[in-house]
Image: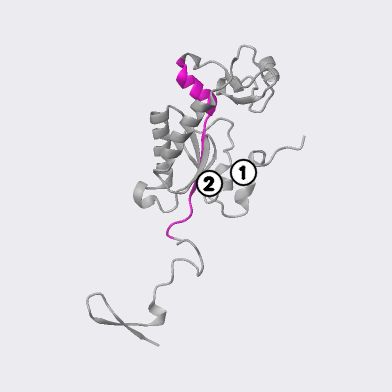
């Protein structure tokens, strides 16, 4: 049955039920299809070691390993040290045998926390929905921010540029429609310079991902 509505200019308008515009999202859907969900995962590269290099620029280009004591474990190794096989959570003794020329530092967590606070404050200027995972890692919900900052890929590049300029650190960014896929690293071993973007869709999408890099998964042996 036609419905008579009053238009903004005061004139009457007859609307047929079949002529009404379809809703932009399904009933009960929390989001409009005009703004697909966009989650950014951000992770500072070799955070502790990079901060130490900022404090002492003479360390740049040398294998820097941050960890505690002779019986402790590696907290972070920069990319130079990783060429020798040094990895996070590795016993310090093993790291010393792999990279005897490495520069081993005990770490300064007060300084790291200060950098972390600055990073989270920076991320908060792009979205009120920032989920801090650790000192150097966070998720940011960029859904609906296109009107303010443009496409999410551009926003990610802007964040990378600001982190480089303001903190003198490099940060990796993954974009996807959920946290799991956003955190999934790219297939290459090295950190990408540009943000990577993945959109989960057909089942074949999952077959293309590197399963050994799935967040929260680890080999049994």
The relative height of residue 81 versus residue 141 in the rendered view (above or below) is above
Numbered-mark total: 2
Residue at left 53%, top 34%?
135
Q: Which residues are magenta?
A: 34-57
| Residue bearing the label numbered 1 | 209
* Frontmost residue, 5 versus 68: 68
**How crowded is the residue under tag 1: few (<14 C-alpha within 10 Å), some, or many (20+)?**
some
| Residue bearing the label numbered 2 | 198
The image's colour scheme reads one colour
- Callout 2 secondary element: loop
Which quarter of the rendering shows the N terminus? bottom left
- Callout 1 secondary element: loop
Image position, residue 195 (x, y; %): 48, 39
Image position, residue 82 (x, y; %): 60, 23
Residue at left 42%, top 29%?
167
Image position, residue 171 (x, y; %): 48, 33
> Which residue is at the far bottom?
1
Q: Earlier in the sequence, mark 2 or mark 1?
A: 2
* Frontmost residue, 130 versus 144: 130
Residue at left 36%, top 46%?
149
Image position, residue 176 (x, y; %): 52, 48
The relative height of residue 150 versus residue 194 in the rendered view (above or below) is below
Viewed as shown, does residue 122 lie left or right of 205? left
> Which residue is at the far front?
110
Q: Are marks 2 and 1 in contact (CB under 8 Å)?
A: yes
Real-space Cα distance between discs 2 and 1? Answer: 10 Å
Which quarter of the rendering shows the C terminus? top right
The relative height of residue 31 versus residue 216 in the rendered view (above or below) is below
Viewed as shown, does residue 220 lie left or right of 44? right
> Which residue is at the far right?
221
């Amino acid at each position: 049955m036609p419905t008579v509505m009053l238009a903004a200019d005061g004139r009457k308008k007859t609307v047929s039920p079949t002529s009404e515009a379809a809703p932009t999202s399904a009933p009960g859907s929390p989001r409009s299809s005009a703004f697909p969900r966009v989650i950014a995962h951000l992770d500072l590269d070799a955070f502790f070691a990079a901060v130490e290099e900022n404090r002492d620029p003479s360390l740049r280009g040398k294998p820097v390993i941050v960890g505690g004591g002779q019986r402790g474990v590696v907290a972070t190794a920069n990319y130079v040290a990783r060429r020798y096989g040094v990895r996070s959570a590795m016993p310090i003794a093993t790291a010393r045998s792999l990279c005897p020329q490495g520069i081993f530092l005990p770490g300064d967590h007060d300084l790291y926390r200060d950098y972390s606070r600055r990073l989270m404050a920076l991320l908060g200027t792009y979205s009120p929905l920032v989920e801090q995972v650790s000192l150097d890692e966070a998720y940011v919900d960029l859904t609906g921010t296109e009107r303010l900052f443009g496409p999410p890929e551009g926003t990610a590049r802007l964040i990378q540029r600001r982190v480089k300029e303001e903190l003198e650190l490099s940060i990796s960014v993954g974009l996807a429609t959920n946290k799991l896929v956003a955190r999934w690293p790219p297939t290459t071993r090295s950190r990408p310079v540009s943000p990577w973007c993945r959109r989960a869709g057909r089942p074949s999408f999952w077959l293309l991902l590197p399963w050994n890099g799935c967040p929260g998964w680890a080999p049994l042996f």
